[in-house]
Image (cartoon, rainbow, N blue to C red):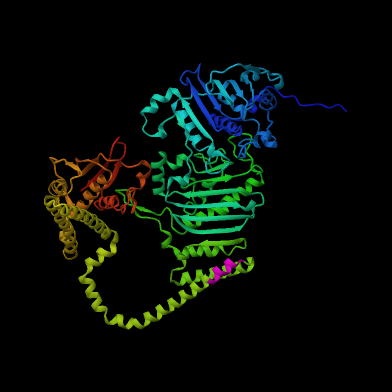
Amino acid sequence: MEQMQFKISSFLKDLIGRELITDEFVAVFELVKNSFDAHAKKVKVIFENQYDPTNARIIIWDNGRGMDKSDLQNKWLFVAHSDKRDGTEDKDYRDKIQHKRTFAGAKGVGRFSCDRLGRYLNLISIKDAPNALIENLKIDWTSFEQDSNKEFIDIKVEHNTLSATNYEDFHQGTILEISGLRDIWDRDRIKKLKVSLEKLINPIQGNDVDDFAIEIIADDELLQDQKEKDDRDKVNGVVRNIVFERLGLKTTQIKVSITNHGGTITTTLTDRGTEIYTLTERNPYDKLYDIDIVLFVLNRAGKINFKKIMGVDSVKYGSVFIYKNGFRIYPFGEEGDDTLQIDRRKQQGFYRYLGTRDLLGRIEINGERSDLRETTSRDGGFIKNESWNQLVEFFYDKALRRLETYTVGIIKWGDEKFDKETGEIIQPELKPEDVKDKILDIISNLTKAKEVIDVQYNQDFLKIYESKQEKSATQLVKNLTRMAEETNNPQFVKQAKAVEKQVSEMRQSIGELERDNATKTEENKNIKKTVSQLQTENLFLISDVTNDTKEFKSLHHHITHTSDLIAEYISIAIEALSKGDNKRVKESLQYIEIENQKILTLSNFVSKAKFDTKTTKINDDIISFVYEYINNLYVITHKKLIVNVEKASFKFVTRFVPIEMIILIDNLLNNSEKAKAQNVSISWVLEESTLTMHYADDGHGIKQEVLPHVFEYRFSTTNGGGLGLYYVKEIVNKMKGSVQIDNSKSKGVEFIITLKK
């Protein structure tokens, strides 16, 4: 019997090169991953002469293990062979290092990314070994394209052993010099590459990726980089990998993990810092193990905060990314990609499902043995096999649907109402404490499943005395009792008995309340007329208290601030008295008298407001009011700040609450004092019926990372109460205005307050 064999055309190079790796960014990624697999700690992506097409080069330089002549012949030039895939890669070397890296690539075709980037390749490599030589390969990729009848193995590449290189500090590793570039790598393209590289590595997934750095070097862009204030707009520098958890987004998130070598699934749902539940169940997916899913829901406020932090809209950044052993798999997460069919599903139930615009997150796959394998086309995602089908089912059933059940069905995510003029939220989505009974329904339903092994939840969810709550709690007791019996888990038995006791106490309390209510019904009828009369007489007071208790806290905050000043002046007076410094004592007492008068003014205002609503607002010129207050009162009691208020030639007459304007100005000035400012300037701009106040100081300014939070209730970077700037915004909002912050100044900060008649 005669045997025959395949012949391989030289055109094979195109099939596994440019026609397989069609994206220039993916080509760079493949070469970066090869550097990681070579145990490099750092890889440099260098652009030379980028605006001179004839001499332009891309250089990929890593400090990995490097290659000798044997490695080049038997590995690098061995097409489609991968020691990574068969497990023989660097066995001797990997035994010497402290941590074992899981390889990022395993196809043996990533090296052909060089062909996608440019016509010529000059490879220089020094192996990490004693007396290693400098090995060199030179390849003209077009030599494979001239004659399809010529066999692939008959195309020769040039090999040299070099005595020296032009690179300083090059002692081991590999350098790829790519020329004859197929793309114009201008500033915009390199910036896009940088953004993509930021998402290439997941630094919290282990696999030593946190010990691997990528640096972009482009000398032609250094001058422009110096003009950019924000590092995000610079080209040169080490690529910073962003992890969503570090953004500080106050939103709803779910984390689902397949743990215990694939034996169990653990799910934790958290809403704005409050843990809703943690569920442990048996894993029904026999093909899946060592997988984590983390999903965040972005409401309108979350999207705004994301853009402030990242400098790009969340929808343009991406949605649900997939990482395998710390490296991103394309095209998952890209803007417009719907491989997981999230958006297609949303179209079937727009108000019931979440779409890619609403989600941010990642799927993390760990380990070398997973059947989840990339397609040979490096931007084609995963091979569609049974493991892939189970991964999609796992994503929907255990992560996305559970997240939707809570966010869409319970807290009514996305139902916020906004002020049309200011754009501020006037009715946010519900908080966990608002929907305890519905949360308990979810937990009760989850525990019905036979696969559930354990469940933990906030015990405060039981503290609601309603008939519907009682029904959910009773069902939960039954489910926990059944689970305790099936699992023979002492902790479950204890938990079930505790819940049963709480439910029993709740029933008893409801019964007592109902009996007490019945006995007092007659009494309520007898005093109904009296209550009605009292309500009429105190209508304004009741309205004032019930509508907004935070308004009272605003006054309390201001009084507390003034009281602190009085305490400080008292200490100064006591110290001066002990030293016999009568002049200083007298001065301190004068300050105390003035500050005390401010408290009396606040107290008198509140008292009068309860009886005479006409005095709460005046119709006057705000510009003159602020000017007179600062120059006639504030500067007398405060010596730390020099405040220059523009005395405008125009007026802005409108209705406002005097004490609120005083509190607004005082809080801004107090904020400047804390920032160690010495000077403050207040100026005005009037355009038709709109007045803009520009308030600027020369203090320490506001750190960029805390800027999105400075107006939040109780947020503080000092030891203060975190109320000052919150009330500034609240007061401006009540006046139908808006407040913005200009943080671009080299020193200090500027608040821009806009008011309309």
- Where is residue 98? Give x, y as percent: 61, 39
Residue found at x 66% / y 31%: 108
Q: Is residue 191 visible?
A: no
Give the position of the N terminus as an image quadrant: top right
Residue found at x 49% / y 36%: 198
Q: Is 365 in front, or is 475?
A: 365
Residue found at x 47% / y 64%: 438
Q: Is residue 491 magenta?
A: yes
What secondary structure characterizes most of the magenta part? helix
Q: Is residue 353 visible?
A: yes
How many numbered callouts?
Answer: 0
Residue at the front extreme?
A: 579
Residue 413 falls in image quadrant? bottom left
Q: Is residue 730 magenta?
A: no
With 102 as the anchor, is 689 left or right in this view? left
- Where is residue 444? Give x, y as percent: 53, 65
Residue at the right extreme?
A: 1
With 615 as the anchor, is 275 left or right in this view? right
Report the span colored magenta. Answer: 489-497
Q: Is 256 in front, or is 641?
A: 641
With 313 as the anchor, is 541 left or right in this view? left
Q: Is residue 243 above or below residue 197?
A: below
With 629 as the anchor, is 78 left or right in this view? right
Q: Is residue 81 above or below residue 152?
A: below
- Where is residue 506? Give x, y as percent: 46, 74
